[in-house]
Amino acid sequence: MNLNLTKKTDIHKKSNFMLYTIEEGDTPFLYYHMIKNANQIITVPSIYLNAISDSTAFMEKHFNDYVYKGTILWNDENYIFYEIIDNIGLTPTYLTDSWWKVTPYEIIYTQKVLTFPIDKYLSFFKEYPQTLFVFDGEKKYDTPIVGYIGLDSVELNQQFLLNNLNYDKGYHFSTIEKAYYESLYADLSPSGNIVKLINYNYITDTPKDDTIHVKNNKFYLNNTYIGDVPPNCNKAAYTLHQYNDNFIYLKSDIKLKKCISYDYFIKRKDPGCMIRYVIFLKKTSLTPNLKRGYDSFTYGKQAPYWFPKYMVRKNSQFVPLSYHYSADSNLEPDYINKKNKDTSIRIK
């Protein structure tokens, strides 16, 4: 931040704690630590300052590692800046948690975190826009946007380690609404010669015979039903490829060209989770596909799903900020294709 902060803090005034962390890397960025109050609104923590020691007591109560940077007196209120050294790492954020990470993009543009509105501090940030950027001397780093993916809870570690669940010629992200849907419904659309099914305890031990039989558009393993055949996928021969507690993977003897274009969403055994990312678009094109010479593309609402989408070329262009376990809802499978989406997002 390029701010002229004073080291003087007035007492007997409302005092707002501007608590931020700077994440280092190829493209440094910052986020604020704010609280979600009883009214489910994200806001800057504040107290009435009777003595300077009140500020220290507040910080010692909530944080272990921090540095006082200075104060701005604005509209007869103190804005006290502390840099928080965040050594906790990536942990889940739950509905009942008080402390939330908030990005400049969310403060200025979306004015919400997930679906929780951000309180009325927008005027302060507009008065002092330097508080939203990281500087290196006179160089100002770009502020990342925020995007989401939804997945099964058992896939979290795989995604954090490999970043491959949202990869298709680039890394794809969308809105919280689409991520929520994806956390509740698994996309079982065939890929290549692999069909994916949900394992409702159909397979618990490795079978001696891995041959799959198709009868009346249903898959059977040793006379045990294991799932429905996706549209136009009943012409191939299948074997059991692999399985885990959540999914069954079948391998066909031919490429499934006639059925891979179908979207096939099935309710998950249990609600999954959503990952919130900061995304560095850098040189971006406003097109539905990545263009040569660009690092990313962004695209607005478009059939068939009517969600904005973002894609970046490299895994250095995004960083996970938080993740949230979804709670079940009455969201219907056809929600994904509705143009006007009314979404009540629930997290645990």
Image: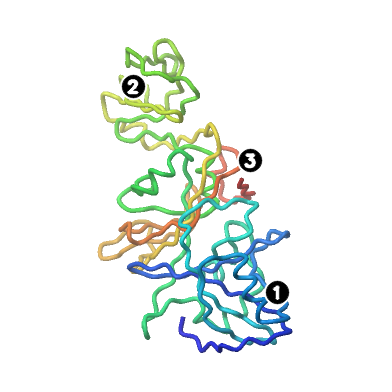
Q: Position of residue 159 (x, y in %)?
A: 39, 46
Query: Looking at the figure, which quarter contains the C terminus?
Result: top right
Q: CA distance from mark 1 to mark 2?
A: 61 Å
Residue that mark 3 sits on: 329
Residue that mark 2 sits on: 240
Task: For the residues labelled 1 and 2, say whether their Cβ atoms are less than 8 Å apart.
Answer: no
Secondary structure under the numbered disc 3 in the rendered image = loop
1 vs 2, front mark? 1
Question: Is 311 situated above or below 8?
Answer: above
Q: Can you tell which mark lies on residue 75?
A: none
Q: Residues within 10 Å of mark 2 (few under 14, many from 20)?
A: some
Q: Position of residue 197 (x, y in %)?
A: 43, 28
Q: Earlier in the sequence, mark 1 or mark 3?
A: 1
Q: Can you tell which mark lies on residue 47?
A: 1
Residue 257 picture quarter: top left
1 vs 3, front mark? 1
Report if residue 231 is visible in the image: no
